[in-house]
Amino acid sequence: MHKFRIKFAIRALLRNKVYTLLNVMGLAIGLGVCLIIFLYLQSELTYDTSIAGYDKIYRVSSVFTVDEQQEEYGGAGIGLAPLLQREFPFIEGATRFVHIDESVLFKRDGIQASDDYVALADHNYFKVFEIPFLAGNPATALDEPQSMVVTRSFAQKYFGDANPVGKLISTNNYEYTVTGLIDDFPANTHHSYSALILSFYRRDKAENWQNSLWQIEAHTFLKLSSAADAARLENDFGSFYQKYMAEAGQGLQADYLINLTPLDEVHFAEPVKFDRPAGNKGYLYAFGGIGLLILVLACINYINMATIRSLRRVKEAGMQKVLGAGKREIVYQVLIESFILASMALLVAMVMVELVLEFTPLNNIMGKDLTLNFMHNLTLWWLPLGLASLIAFLSGWFPALYLSKVPAMAGLKKGIIRQKGGLGVRKLLVGFQFTISVAVVITALLMYRQMEFVRSKDLGFNKEDVMLIPIRDTLTARTISGIRQKLAQSPYIKASSSAQAIPGKSVDRIVINVPGVKGTLSQQVVDFMMVGEDYFKTMEIEFVEGHTFSEQDEVSNTYPVIINE
């Protein structure tokens, strides 16, 4: 019996090819957009949860209070991690980690390429971050100087399919031994890297390593048993401060405390300095709301078309009743057709999503690696099926009830029977659909204007026709003056200069004395960058007051400094 109903439903859909095609494609587009948005939201909301034991890892941020002003940094001094672990026995592990802000040039057997995702860590890193190794031993991978752990993609680039563990790779200044191989990090990892190099060991052996507690040099992560231990550490930090930092704090006229943020909350934590850009839950909710509205639009359109078609099937329903079909059979038949249509739309939507993610630059634009991975993402089984089933039921229920109530002979005679409430429901749905459409269009226009504002905003310097040439070795850095003289001979180059980094990227921090509120000098931590001659001319940066560096500055007893407003 059920097989006959399915065959009958398929034939009915094939007889109305235009209706079937419009319904399937309309619903498929809505489901496809909703699936992509869901994958994006899932990626954002599960940041860093791919790391084993993520719920026990906390990031230490430093809060400085200078002249009654607070500033928070997503890092700490390199001496803080080992000292905290020594003073507080309940800390299971502590490690330091920092990204190298510039690309690093690697060389091996004639292969030479640069990598932008290189990081430094101490020997305790894999005791805190339990990352599975494909080759090598995580317990000893960062024990020896010049050790390096690489990801699968890094190893493929320099070593091919061979096991890289034990092999050598060099930069312009050092030679490293690969001691471990790990898988590539998911895109939703806050502190990912392609190569991790052992560092800090020389500083740990220095006599004055404890004096670096006030300098923000690395991210510090702690492994704790529970959130109660995190609160306990924050509360007891005062005694640590008095023991190790208070004396220096008096000299700096500054105060210091720490905040602990769970690893899986770092991405959406309040933005702090010395850290990568954080996510924004407000934008995320707005994005999810837009996806939901698009899905609702597709559903309403689908339900309206199904309702209109039901008005033209009165004769068919009347004939079925004459032949002995009851109300239940009519309802089943309409619902089966609705479920078949929704299933077809779901299959088309999945194919569309796979093609979009694979063959369009959408992933690159979003900075993600979204895929329809049904093996590792069980939500992709129940969510689309649940949505399709709900849509099929809602769209089929009203037409099914309508057709089941049509008297057999009246349906055969009149063909279309208007029910009193049906027109009002359709008007309500159309009005709701129109309202949502207007809201989506207005939101899209606002987002477009916001993006146009970002693109056209004056950054304070000219970024057009400016080429950046990274200098990766100290030998070349010493010959910058000679290089610039050669460049000046070209008629195609208007100006050239040197700098530690690109505009907007903080390079270093320094404590400076500034006039306080009471006329006395107070100290503040500021970001600074060293630049070469003609930097402001090259970048076309205008001065509000004062002037750029001059030759007289080189023979002056003071250091020239240019500040922003």
Image (cartoon, rainbow, N blue to C red):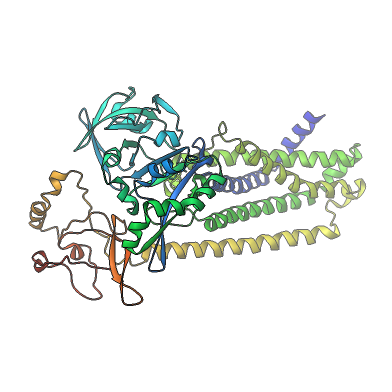
Question: Which residue occupies 56% across, 62% down?
Answer: 441
Question: Which residue occupies 60% across, 38% down?
Answer: 380
Q: Is residue 380 visible?
A: yes
- Quadrant where the N terminus is found in the figure: top right
Q: Is the residue 532 above or below the residue 408 in the image?
A: below
Q: How many marks?
A: 0
Residue nearest the viewer, comparing 529 with 235:
235
Question: Which residue occupies 46% across, 54% down?
Answer: 238
Give left or right: position of 551 versus 505: left
Give left or right: position of 370 versus 75: right
- Quadrant where the C terminus is found in the figure: bottom left
Residue nearest the viewer, comparing 139 with 1:
139
Question: Which residue occupies 60% across, 63% down?
Answer: 439
Residue 109: x and y, percent?
A: 21, 27
Q: Is the residue 276 above or below the residue 149 in the image?
A: below
Q: Is the residue 535 above or below the residue 232 in the image?
A: below
Q: Is residue 268 visible?
A: no
